[in-house]
Image (cartoon, rainbow, N blue to C red):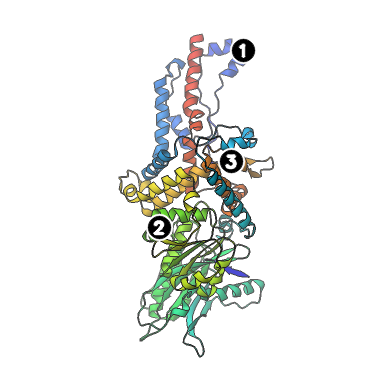
Amino acid sequence: MWSPQDRKYNSPPTQLSLKPNSQSLRSGNWSERKSHRLPRLPKRHSHDDMLLLAQLSLPSSPSSLNEDSLSTTSELLSSRRARRIPKLVQRINSIYNAKRGKKRLKKLSMSSMETASLRDENSESESDSDDRFKAHTQRLVHIQSMLKRAPSYRTLELELLEWQERELFEYFVVVSLKKKPSRNTYLPEVSYQFPKLDRPTKQMREAEERLKAIPQFCFPDAKDWLPVSEYTSETFSFMLTGEDGSRRFGYCRRLLPSGKGPRLPEVYCVISRLGCFGLFSKVLDEVERRRGISAALVYPFMRSLMESPFPAPGKTIKVKTFLPGAGNEVLELRRPMDSRLEHVDFECLFTCLSVRQLIRIFASLLLERRVIFVADKLSTLSSCSHAVVALLYPFSWQHTFIPVLPASMIDIVCCPTPFLVGLLSSSLPKLKELPVEEALMVNLGSDRFIRQMDDEDTLLPRKLQAALEQALERKNELISQDSDSDSDDECNTLNGLVSEVFIRFFVETVGHYSLFLTQSEKGERAFQREAFRKSVASKSIRRFLEVFMESQMFAGFIQDRELRKCRAKGLFEQRVEQYLEELPDTEQSGMNKFLRGLGNKMKFLHKKN
């Protein structure tokens, strides 16, 4: 039954108390006094902006509220917002701004967008050939038909919220290679597991099914092994996905047992509900350290670990252990505030792939196509698979994900639903013999496509694809430029830059989603799909969204936002907030216009009296 797979918060609206002279108020009628009421501040200004305004000494005399003071106020607000954005992000944004142009969102009301005619779809000045339109229509039909066959998974975000208070891991296993009778080949088997599955419950039976699959992932290359005298330990991971969409991560350390002469390696594997590669890598370091002394020291350590709760983001747990010769020890395990990039190494992608090839793969995954990686090493497949999935943030890959597919399970690549799998090069001859449906096959060792669909260069909006390519080509230059804030240090790394470049792509395409989440009287949220898509000025982005919005990635993203009782948090939401402040219509209806209009009204009243 288990298939393997590896509103922005605002402070309450405030009113500024600027009073004209009392005589003019007394002499006027009610409607005149009503005109003196100041409008509420626009909701798009943050709490920090409100605090800044409160610190400004606005004059009590209307005549002294001149253009200079208003300009100064506007500049202060703009500079305050700019300081919240790291320099590196500003440089990335400038690349997108130069490539994209000024058009972003249309100035349409909700009702007019909902009733927009089909002619509006073709009213842009961007050139559009019949061939491009035909290809777009075919992609739309293809993704709709393919996803009808795919199971509907729960979003990873909801699963994370549900399980993050559970134990640190579910079970720990040791997998060894056993020689087949009468054959000179080996089979992987579980030689130790903790805890033992004693009770014959439904949950235990499901766990047993999962345990049967684990050895194949620990040794996907079992048929290629012979005893060796030396072997450098290797760390990798995999993922198991159940029919209900629930996921479990396997964190593995493959090493050579202590001893003399040729021998076979074994794998120590931790199975957990939660993805936190750095934390479990540290656990495996301790396992390897104890294994180097005696295998008997590993199991008491894992028992103490299982009694520890999974730490909340940014929190640390302490595990008390005993080690002969060292005495009592305390192991500290910290879960980072943002573990999104914790298990990711983007360097491996640029080592194996050119920027153009990487963007083509990214585009294929966005439209939930089938993608197969081929490489010589387990670590290369594992690292590149996890890294390319991380590019999809804030979206989550919802389909089959097997960073290292065992050779015995290679038939999975024939399934008609979307997948991302990795295969060792030794399986390539068999792969070429299989009747694989349309798929992108990538050789990570030679930076070339073994098979492709030939439209990978046309899947993304043209201008945004150019911005993506330019920013990634200039990655070293952008990182090396001077920064002047602590926040820059956090993202002035290759991982930080690459993440920000792709986040900006999604900000440009879907960053306005929150404007189209409506709330009913019962408090239920609903997303206005067509209004959201038609609000975009660029036709190429609208066309892209028409296809992308059919994906399960997008559906899961919106479902997560609709069901949340409070707004989503994270880096993407921060960048969206900054993006919405940049929009031209925001500026027109924002603080600058408010203060200027207020000043003009006060001047008029002063002259009138």
- Give the residue drawn at x 49%, y 88%: 183
Residue under label 3, please give it.
532
- Foreground mark, 1 or 3? 3
Expressed as whole percent of the image width and height from the top left, the position of residue 323 reads 40, 76
Q: Which mark is residue 346?
A: 2
Q: Is residue 153 left or right of residue 281?
A: right
Kindly tell me whether residue 530 is visible in this rendering: yes
Q: Residue at x 46, y 87 (%)?
A: 184
Single out the mark in the foreground, 1 or 2. Answer: 2
Q: Earlier in the sequence, mark 1 or mark 3?
A: 1
Inspect the image, locate mark 3, and give the three-letter code of the amino acid beneath it.
Answer: Phe
Q: Which mark is residue 584?
A: none
Q: CA distance from mark 2 to mark 3?
A: 32 Å
Q: Are marks 1 and 2 in contact (CB under 8 Å)?
A: no
Q: Is residue 10 above or below residue 415?
A: above
Count of labels in the image: 3
According to the image, label 1 marks what residue? 29
Whole-percent x, y for residue 308 in the image: 51, 66
Q: Residues within 10 Å of mark 3 (few under 14, many from 20)?
A: many
Local secondary structure at mark 3: helix
Mark earlier in primary sequence (2, 3): 2
Nearer-the-camera pick, 297 or 330: 297
